[in-house]
Amino acid sequence: MERTEAGAARGESRLRLVAAAEEQAWNERHLSRPVRAPLIAAWSYRAPAVVLGCSQRPDAAISAAARAARVALVERRSGGGAVLAGPWLLGVSVVLPPDHPLVVPSVTESYRWFGEAHAAALRRAGIHCQAVRVATARAVGRWWRSQPAGTTARWACFGALSPWEVMTAGGRKLSGMAQVRRRTGALLVSGTLLAQPDWRLLCRVVDGSAGAAAQLGERASSCEAELGRQVRPDRMARLIVDALQDALGIQG
């Protein structure tokens, strides 16, 4: 019987309180050797950190802005846009063997089960949402780009939308996703907004644009905003991990 490394016990034991760099170290460590069985970890963050996608190399201006804002600057191996990690964000990592049946040839299609599991968990929490199909994601992307200064916030994870990420019934992004594939295995990661981040802080470090902060506020939502109340990170982590285990056929 397979078990997640995060453990089978319910509640807070499934949620790891870390610095953002520790999450990235865990991801890298588990892809540095052949993955033999699925592993799941859920993350909560002690302090704010700007996490950049693999194509977003921090230049001198970004590094200086991060120091001035007193936030950590972290690079991840997966793609996607910049994220502001902190107590408002719930992260999840799933590592799969390279020959796992859910690691399909199409990179886009391989997100499908991951996004649908997240959406199912969030609906169970009472949030009206769905994993966005390919055609919908492309249509929303075109509409966002058609708006005045529509590309301003596309450097941010929550300023763009990809297939199978999670969107609320009101058309706002709730969970972002990224992926890494190697001969040793595949890594899927997600970030779900539990509460509204300080978009101005993220923009101050990465972009310097007040317009981007406003766009992010319009394009993204959070569990708290959708439910109208505070949410417990450990409960949301439990729901998402349970849904992922069900999708993977793991007995918790």
Image (spheres, helix red, strand yellow):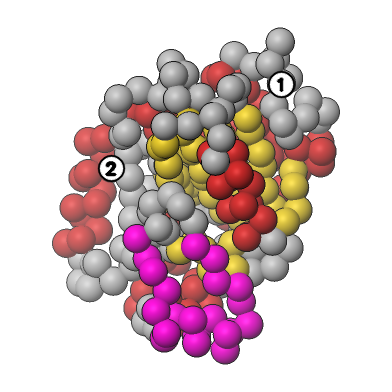
**Quadrant position of the N terminus in the picture:** top right
Foreground pick, 193 / 183: 183
Where residue 137 is drawn, which disc sits there?
A: 2
For residue 58: magenta? yes
Vertical relation: 125 (above or below) 219: above
Vertical relation: 123 (above or below) 207: above
Foreground pick, 157 / 180: 180
User: Quick one: label 2, few (<14), some, or many (20+) residues within 10 Å?
Assistant: some
Q: Is residue 71 visible?
A: yes
- Identify the secondary structure beneath mark 1: loop
The type of residue carrying mark 1 is Arg
Q: Nearer the viewer, mark 2 or mark 1?
A: 1
Picture coordinates of residue 149, whole percent (x, y): 22, 73
The type of residue carrying mark 2 is Ala
Where residue 34 is drawn, which disc sits there?
A: none
* CB under 8 Å between discs 2 and 1: no
Picture coordinates of residue 76, whole percent (x, y): 49, 56
Apparent side of residue 162 relative to residue 226 in the rendered image (left or right):
left
Vertical relation: 30 (above or below) 63: above
Magenta residues (range): 55-75
Instruction: Identify the residue position indicated by label 1 in the image.
Output: 3
Foreground pick, 55 / 157: 55
